[in-house]
């Protein structure tokens, strides 16, 4: 029974890696989904956001207009700080509950929590291990350009706002280099899975 935080910067392919682990039998929780759930219509989180930013931040159906919210906080550090003060504690509470539920009923060999901001938000401290997905910058930029129909300048701006990949490496128990072929990535994933399942105690920190 191992709790793993899987992280990586934009364009690293961490969601694809998470899917591979899920196919192998891991229980996977995506914190992006949790982040959406904690500000869904009717939640205290969304109510606080509307009180602060106004009803103009909502879609016609009452849900949070995430692109509009992202545009606001990207250009306003104080707005981002406020938003994080609402969202991050709520995410942490949900993760603690999910981890407790898993430990009480371990229905998979290990639990993987996919979290882009695992290290930045200190969530890594809740994990037994951190697995980091890395990618070279050229591949990273090209992937995001193709995925988001963005310009190179837009991607570079988003990358500059993130914690550098190299600064995350010291936190990692395992590193998956996703710069190469799908076969190369799959081979790494299989090896890590095998090690984690066969020697779980040795793998825990």
Image (tube, rainbow, N blue to C red):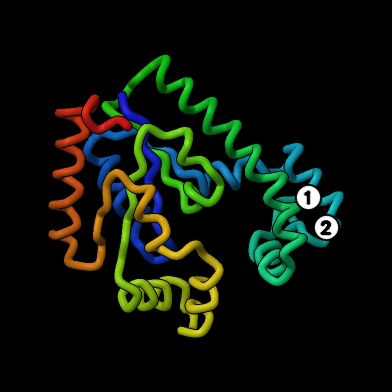
Q: Give the percent coordinates (x, y) of residue 12.
A: 35, 62
Position of the N terminus by quadrant: top left
Position in image of residue 74 (x %, y %):
66, 68
Dots 1, 2 in contact, CB < 8 A: yes
Label 1 neighbour load within 10 Å: few <14, some 14-19, many 20+: many
Quadrant placement of the C terminus? top left
Please report the residue visible at 53 percent of the width from the left and 28 percent of the height from the top: 96
**Residue occupying image coordinates x 30% and y 66%:** 135
Residue lying at 35% horizontally and 37% vertically, measured from the top left: 129
Q: Could you say whether the residue bearing mark 1 is in a helix, strand or loop?
A: helix
- Toward which corner of the image does residue 110 lie, by quadrant? top left
Residue where numbered disc 2 is placed: 53
Judging by the rendered image, the residue that carries numbered circle 1 is: 49
Q: Position of residue 130 (x, y in %)?
A: 36, 43
| Residue 53 x, y percent position in the rendering | 83, 57
Which element carries disc 2, helix, strand or loop? helix
């Amino acid at each position: 029974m191992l709790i793993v935080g899987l992280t990586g910067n934009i364009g690293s392919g961490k969601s694809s890696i998470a899917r591979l682990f899920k196919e192998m039998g891991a229980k996977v929780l995506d914190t992006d989904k949790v982040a959406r759930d904690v500000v869904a219509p009717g939640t205290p989180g969304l109510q606080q956001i509307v009180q602060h930013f106004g009803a103009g931040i909502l879609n016609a159906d009452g849900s949070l207009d995430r692109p509009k919210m992202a545009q606001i906080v990207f250009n306003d550090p104080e707005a981002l700080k406020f938003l994080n003060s609402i969202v991050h504690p709520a995410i942490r509470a949900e993760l603690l509950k999910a981890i407790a539920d898993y430990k009480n009923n371990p229905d998979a060999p290990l639990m993987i929590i996919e979290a882009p901001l695992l290290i930045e938000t200190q969530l890594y401290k809740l994990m037994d291990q951190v697995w980091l997905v890395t990618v070279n910058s050229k591949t990273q930029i090209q992937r995001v350009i193709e995925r988001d129909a963005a310009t190179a300048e837009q991607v570079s701006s988003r990358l500059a706002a993130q914690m550098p990949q190299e600064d995350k490496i010291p936190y990692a128990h395992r590193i998956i280099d996703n710069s190469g072929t799908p076969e190369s990535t799959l081979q790494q994933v299989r090896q890590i899975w095998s090690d984690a399942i066969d020697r779980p105690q040795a793998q825990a920190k």
